[in-house]
Amino acid sequence: MRIQKMENLNFAFAFMQKKNVNVTNIGSSDILDGNNKLVLGLMWTLIKAFQVAEIDVEGVSGKDGLLLWVNRSLADYPTVEVKNFSSSWADGMAFCALIHRYAPTLIDFNQLNPKDPQTNVKLAFDIAREKFRIPQLLEVENVAGQAKPDEKSITTYVSLLFKEFASGVQKKKAVTTISKALNIAQRHQELAAEFSQNASGLLEWLTQQTERFQTLSQPRHIPDIKEALARHLDYKKNEKPPREAQFVAVEGCAGRWIASCKNNGRAVPNLDPPIEKLQALKAQLDELETAFELKLRQNLESYQKTEIFLTKVVKDLEKVECWAKEKEALALFAEDLAVTSTADAEEKLESVAFLQDIELPRYKQLLATVVDEADGLSEEHSDTKATLERLEAMKNFVTMAENKVEGVKARLEESLRLQQEVDLVAKDAKALMRNLKYVIEEMDEEVEAAIKLEDVSKAGVVAAKHKFDTVLVPKVQKAVVSENEKLIEKKQILADAGRAGDVALIEKTNARVQKLLDSLAEKRGYYEEELANVEKRDEVCREFAALSARIKERCVQSTQSINVVEGSLKDQFNSMVKLRYRLFRANTGVVLEEEVEEKPEDPEITGVETPAAVEVVKPAAETEVAPESEEGDKSKDVTAEVEETKAKQAEETKAKQVEEAKAKAAEIITPLTEDMEKLERINEELERLQVHTNPFTTDTIHGLRAQFTSLETAVRDKVKSLEKELALSEVGSLTPQQAKEIKEVFDHFDLDNDGVLARDEFIMACKGLGLSLSEDDCHDYFDKIDEEDNDEITFDQFSTFCTEQLQSGSTKDDVHEALDILTGEQLTLEQLEERFDASQVEFIKKNAPELLEADGKSLDTEKLADFIFSV
């Protein structure tokens, strides 16, 4: 056993010899025999060789380098002066100052009392042990207040502080890296919750509404159609707009989530439900809604036309039925008709003649009109069948009346042969007045009916006016005015015969005719006024339809721009800020006019492409020309003038193109807010004109307001999200003080002032910056940086290397590297509370059960990294 122990000790002495550790007056047997004095001397030799000698600060190594590091660290503490590793530490102020320099929150340095060394030393030792796990190599009593504490022990203890605080930069970088990754993970978890909360309800609503419109049947009666149309418009006004807003919010949330994952190295999430499914359902629902509403409008128009025809048919048919009922009771149609006198015969013959020549033709014509109008009745209407049966009965009655009248007339004419010239004129006049009476009454009804418009559209009003001018007015001229002229001709004959009563009747009839003509003139003015209103309604409706289509298209295009924006975070942020300014003129700090002036050829801004700038040829005076003859010089002068003229023309052409592009941009880029304000004014005009249904579009002001508000919210949220991600990306960047320190270290270790660092100078510079790198790591990094094998590196290469070492990253590899740095301390939940924000600690605790090691205190760093990049 002793031989084996001796061999093991010999291996140790051989290693020390290989490392050039000078060991004298001690051998393996001295250690094996337990020579305490020699063993303690050997221990100090080992500490000095492997703990203290490795310290290198600004080219000064060992104990002197450690002392230099202490003085550099305490440069801002004028009350603390360290000259050695013995008496300078007796009051404890140097220990406390070092801890305060690298962890200012742990000690209130201004409250320390140099005259109370016992408290100062104990405070420093306790904090170093509890917070940094530096073992207490000394007793407080052996240092506090001592005139000369043990130099070796103080040196050893201060070297442990150097090891801890020199690696602080790397630990801070590790904490920053993990913090950034945690912030992104928290943001993704919030977006996932927001999407899940809104998308499922939206999917259920879209599915229900799609199925409802697919199974919805069309009503078959006008009141039911109107009620269904009112319910549909109420649905578009009250129920759908919030869902439109919810759809835009879900779409925007998904876009921000996916974009953030792409920007931060996360896997693109599998959305449930997929956003494509929501978009497809939304498009299908819009199509079904539009088709249902258009079908309702078509059916309403068709049934209204049927109602108009049916009303007209029934009204005219009632006239024929009333006449038929009246004629059925006449004695003229009796089989035993007898004539007792000439006057009686004349009266009856007149009745028959009136019936045959006036009433029968008139009512036959009326009946023919009713038959023609009945052809337009819908067979599905409930009243059509009964009306057609009544019409057939009247046709049979008229045929029967015609046959009977012929027989009665023949018998009466035989009786009137001797009285044919008696009172002929008076009789004719009375016949004309009776005819005019019926015709005027009929014309009055038709004139009144003509201004009761069922269709108030432009086409309806124009058709009604055309019918009034081409049918009703000529009809009055033919049936009333021409007959009245005949009556006027008979007036003088009757006046000369002294028939004052008949003359008075004719004048009364003439006054009634004039009243009818005045009414016609008045009604023609009504049509002109109504047509003006119709044209105004159509004009405003078309304007509303065109502007609403433009606003919808801009909303869709802008939503797509939000969701597909690409490039760096800065580029995405700038794009969204510009988009927000162009749509809403929000106070984003971007001046759009300057951008157009600087880049008139940008199609994203102007919507048009301008020709490329014309290359300007340099004047001949600026080019080098070899000496030539006088004639050659003159030729070159002429050439120079031509080139200069071309250059000026090119500049003028380019300036003109820029001005045209700016003018075009001013026409195209109008804020969406201005379009929406204009649409609101148009809607107010439609309400004033009492337009409740726009025939040129199915869009409503309520839906467009919801889309506008949702788009504004989506753009604002996108800008805020990118702004937050930009802020996160800048966390952990190099500070100006660190950049200055890199330059100072490079200049200090560039011993020969040749502007480059040799291998040894590079290694000393790394240690001077406090980078936690072994000598082998330094060699590896030097070989990697020195790609041309010049055995030297420039300041730019050294600066890039230091930036990578000191600047935090956000990739999964950066997080793994950061966790590896902290793993040596066994990362626990308690340490998390000291190093990270409260919200980040709470986020980790929430998921802690699956991240803890078996001991229930330490965190599994592999699981932590995988969890951070899984959300």
Image (tube, helix red, strand yellow):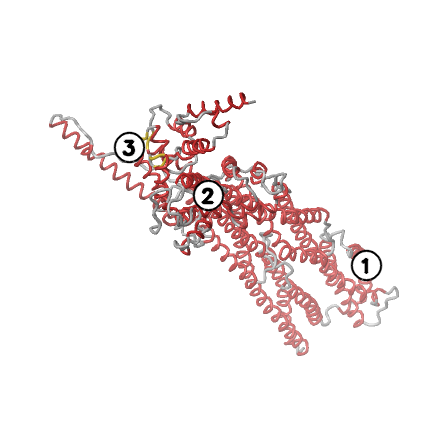
Circle 3 crowding by C-alpha within 10 Å: few under 14, some 14–19, many from 20: some
Per the image, the residue denoted by label 3 is 751
Q: Which mark is residue 323?
A: none
Separation of residues labelled 1 and 3 (CA atoms): 132 Å
Badge 2 vs badge 1, beta-carbon distance below 8 Å? no
For the residues labelled 3 and 2, the Cα–Cα distance comes to 39 Å
Percent x, y for residue 272?
64, 42
Q: Residue at x 59, y 69 (%)?
A: 518
Q: For mark 2, what is the residue?
A: 138
Q: Nearer the viewer, mark 1 or mark 3?
A: 3
Amino acid under disc 1: Phe
In the rendered image, residue 43, in percent from the top left (x then y), is placed at: 45, 33
Mark closest to the chain's N terminus, 2 or 1? 2
Position above or below: 85 against 4: below
Q: In the drawing, what numbered circle is on residue 397? A: 1
Quarter of the image with the N terminus in it = top right
* Quarter the C terminus occupies: top right
Marks 2 and 1, Cα distance to the nearest angstrom? 136 Å
Mark earlier in primary sequence (3, 2): 2
Residue 622's quadrant in the figure? Answer: top left
In the rendered structure, which disc, 1 or 3, sits on the residue that comes first in sequence? 1
Residue 67 versus residue 364 in the image, above or below: above
Query: Pointer 1: residues within 10 angstroms few (<14), some, or many (20+)?
Result: some
Element type at mark 3: loop
* Percent position of residue 347, x then y: 78, 70
What amino acid is at disc 2? Leu
Q: Nearer the viewer, residue 543 or 8?
A: 8
